[in-house]
Amino acid sequence: MIEVLYFAWVRERIGTPRETVETDAETVQALVDQLRAREPRYAAAFQDLSALRVAVDQELTDFTAPLAGAREVAFFPPMTGG
Amino acid sequence: MRVRVQADPFDLGAEANAFVARQKGAQAGAIVTFTGIVRDIADGLDVMEIEHYPGMTERALDAIIDQAHQRWPLADAFVLHRYGRMHVDEAIMMVATAARHRKDAFEAAEFLMDYLKSRAPFWKKEHSAQNAAWVAAREEDETALNRWSD
């Protein structure tokens, strides 16, 4: 079980800010593949991973990151603060 | 306090004065503040909406401030960033740095700005009467980070 969070247009495209996902994915990439297979809205949101950033347990990382022991994964576009 | 993330507007003068006051005795001869203000857009901006990632936002800003302290001999550094809805000419965020000399204070303030623009989890959405669009990250914001990598 892992909490998956979405922000900005990723949240809008998927239609929810967060959900609990039952998964055996060992990496972020494997989780993305499982989500893509769910429904077209996920496939649309994860179409181009170069347009996305990912954080595992609130630390920026990349799509090859392992999920062992992770509680929270967040997907979002490049950040635009300041 | 090094980081504050809030929806409410803030009083730049009061924040700057509070930052100066807490440097008493620190031999901080130089204090720099930067403030980001909501700009208008071609369509006419009704509302600037800023989304953030509660929890990660504070951690990311704190980590960026740690890095600034490692790179420059700072007496203090502070970041205040708003989220939620704001209008043209309102202040979005501010950074303040204090150091013995101005070069360190200026450089650290620029470093904090460059990093928080593309490494702190904030996303801007511009609402006009006709349209609402997420602001795209700019290539030059990413390249601005390169000058700090050595």
Image (cartoon, coloured by chain):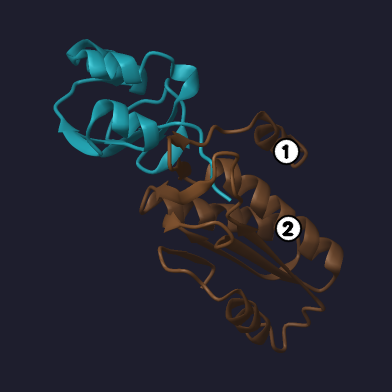
Image quarter of the C terminus of chain B: top right
Question: Which residue is at 48% across, 44% downward?
Answer: B124
Q: Colour of chain A?
A: cyan
Q: Is residue B144 left or right of residue B84?
A: right
Task: Identify the subunit bearing mark 1.
Answer: B
Q: Label 1: how many residues lie within 10 Å, few (<14), some (14-19) or many (20+)?
A: some
Percent of width and height locating residue B54: 36, 53
Q: Colour of chain B?
A: brown
Question: Which residue is at 37% across, 31% downward?
Answer: A9
Residue B83 visible in the displayed image:
no
Where disc 1 sits, the SS reads helix
Percent of width and height locating residue A52: 45, 25
The amino acid beneath tag 2 is: Ala
Foreground pick, B17 / A12 = A12
Q: Which numbered marker is on residue B144? A: 1
Percent of width and height locating residue B62: 52, 58
Question: Which residue is at 14% across, 27% downward?
Answer: A22
Q: Is residue B60 left or right of residue B75?
A: left
The quadrant holding residue B72 is bottom right
Q: Is residue A74 left or right of residue B70?
A: left
The quadrant holding residue B92 is bottom right
Percent of width and height locating residue B107: 78, 56
Q: Which residue is mark 2?
A: B108
The amino acid beneath tag 1 is: Ala
Where disc 2 sits, the SS reads helix
Q: Which numbered marker is on residue B110? A: none
Q: CA distance from mark 1 to mark 2?
A: 14 Å
- Between discs 1 and 2, the one toward the N terminus: 2
State whether residue B79 is above or below residue A4: below
Task: Identify the subunit bearing mark 2.
Answer: B
Foreground pick, B89 / A5 = B89
Q: Label 2: how many residues lie within 10 Å, few (<14), some (14-19) or many (20+)?
A: many
